[in-house]
Image (tube, rainbow, N blue to C red):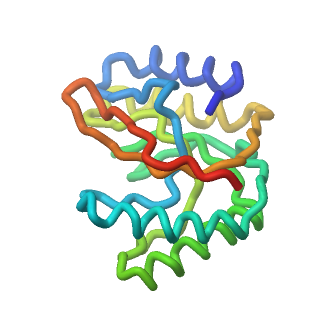
Amino acid sequence: MKLSDDLLNFRSGLMEATRNSHITWVHPDKFHITLHFFGDVEESVLPIIYAFHSKVVSACKPFTLKYERTGYFGSKKQPQIIWYGYSCPEEFQLLHATLVKELKAAGFRPEERKFHPHITLGRIKGMHDIGIFNEYIEKINRERISHHFEVNSIQVIKSILKPQGPEYQVLYDLKL
């Protein structure tokens, strides 16, 4: 997933503006949008995961996601995750709803939170520049940034946690 130069430049500016804070930044090569986080699963469950993902994507067509805004999870005083948020067009809502239905049928527990497509930019461990951080987020959101990308596949990815950050291994790449 490739971000526009505007979004990459804002990310760099935010990194510089909050350099005194403890934030683990996600490398652009690892940007992705998560449809569902499974956590730890046994290898024997992977064929089941593949089967219902295959069923879900077989009914979907490619669609476009558009950048909407920059935000964070957590409170204004204690943000935890910084993200770039994207639109959720009807095709994506259908894809997600169908996946949730299949998850339930297969005995998996879907997330309780409302689905919000986003790319995680960083995980905040300690924010020392909260005023500067909030000003920068507001500045980014005042800009008229045009960024979109075509979604034409869904990947099932294994996350391998390492001290230097997660490593991702694509298990399945399913075309829409």
Residue 59: x percent and y percent?
72, 70
Q: Quadrant of the N terminus?
A: top right
Q: Find residue 33 and report its horizontal and vertical position in percent.
A: 54, 47
Look at the picture and state if 120 lies above or below 113.
above
Relative depth, front residue between 84 and 55: 55
Whether residue 77 is visible to the viewer of this picture, yes or no, is: no
* Farthest-out residue, left: 163
Q: Is residue 114 visible?
A: yes
* Farthest bottom residue in view: 105
Q: Does residue 27 lie above or below 43 as drawn?
A: above
Front position in the image: 162 or 138 = 162
- 123 to 174, vertically: above or below: above
Residue occupying image coordinates x 68% and y 66%: 58
Relative image position of residue 93 (x, y in whole percent): 68, 68
From the viewer's perspective, is 28 left or right of 47?
Answer: right
Measured along the vertical axis of the image, is residue 43 above or below residue 90?
above
- Image quadrant of residue 128? top left
- Quadrant for residue 3, please give it: top right
Percent position (x, y) of residue 29?
50, 25
Q: Which residue sits at x=72%, y=35%?
A: 142
Q: Viewer-proximal residue, 3 or 170?
A: 170
Count of all numbered marks drawn on residues in the image: 0
Query: Which residue shows up at 39% across the image and 52% down it?
Result: 74
Give the position of the C terminus as an image quadrant.
Answer: bottom right
